[in-house]
Image (tube, rainbow, N blue to C red):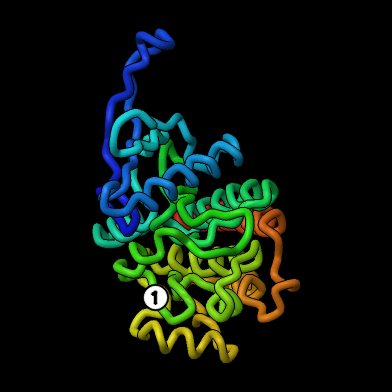
Amino acid sequence: GSGAFGEVYKAQLDESYTRNAPEYTVAAKTVLDAKASPEASSELLAEAGVMASVGKHPNLVSLIGVITRGDPLVLILQFCSQGELLGMLKKAAAEGEPISIMDKMQMAREVAQGMDHLSKNHFIHRDLACRNVLYADGTCKIADFGLSRGGGGEDASAEDAAQHEDYYKSSAGVFPVRWTAPEAMETLRFTVASDVWSFGILVVELLNNGESPYYGMSNPDVMKMTMSGGRHAKPPLCSNRLFSWLLKCWDENTAERPSFSQLTTAFKDMYSTSSTSTDANAARVEAAT
């Protein structure tokens, strides 16, 4: 597959000569055109540095290693057999069997857990969305740390990002407008609070089975609305309790937005509530029949 920043291959890693390890499946990530854009290779190396610094976590895609010999540079990552969460949501809905609200709450909790680990290690993702969450062995794993930073700053792959429909190029820079907090749109300074805003939009994606946020609106219209205080509409099947948490994620005052630790706890509770409600409904159906 390929995206705004590079290509990813399914590959076999043979370490039998170096570690006496049997061959196993991995994901191999390279830049699109290393010779034409040497800065992209630097960006890939920076991504590897972020992943190495953050360390292992069950809700983050793991770094296995980097191949620096030869051209292009290759990042070797954990292979996630079920692919991106966005595709999973759309496929399940298209087949008439959308993912249950209980499972979606569990997915949201897992993403919050991964982001909590990332933020506690003083890193900001800057591009949190369902397209950048992978699924493997029944678990969500945050991926694509290519935009991650220990703070703000310009992104070396901005021109590549500008070619992707999810990104918006303005005179100030490039960002995924539908997932970006208004203060970050204005200043291009990203923080944990702007990642929390993005998390709220990711939950909307979950609830709407992968439909584009602010469906039917243009990027400029979304920018105008959010920067003037407007917020995403309440999705169908979204409880008042859940929507109150989303509104907290989108609070105009960044200091009032919840932490990822608080979100992890909140979605754990909502998952438990959804599970109990599902069991109760099943019992009622069984009694009725």
Q: Residue furthest right?
A: 255
254 left or right of 230 in image = right
The residue sitting at 55% across, 36% down in the picture is: 52
Query: As rendered, which of 13 and 79 lies closer to the eye?
Result: 13
Residue 37's place in the image compared with 20, above or below, is: below
Quadrant where the C terminus sits is bottom left
Residue 95 location (% of width, % of height): 24, 57
- Which residue is labeled 1 in the image? 168
Query: As rendered, which of 242 and 65 lies closer to the eye?
Result: 65
230 left or right of 157 in image = right
- Answer yes or no: is residue 141 visible: no
Residue 259: image quadrant is bottom right
Residue 274 location (% of width, % of height): 56, 57
Query: As rendered, which of 248 and 105 lies closer to the eye?
Result: 248
- Answer yes or no: is residue 138 visible: yes
Residue 228: image quadrant is bottom right
Residue 79 location (% of width, % of height): 37, 35
215 left or right of 124 in image = left
Disc tally is 1
The residue sitting at 36% across, 58% down in the picture is: 86
Query: As rendered, which of 68 and 124 lies closer to the eye?
Result: 68
Q: Secondary structure at mark 1?
A: strand
Residue 184: image quadrant is bottom right
Q: Which amino acid type is marked by label 1?
A: Tyr
Residue 94's place in the image compared with 8, above or below, is: below
Structural crowding at the residue carrying mark 1, measured as other residues with C-alpha within 10 Å and reported as few (<14), some (14–19) or many (≥20)? some
Residue 231 location (% of width, % of height): 54, 83
The residue sitting at 70% across, 74% down in the picture is: 254
36 left or right of 132 in image = left
The residue sitting at 27% across, 35% down in the picture is: 10
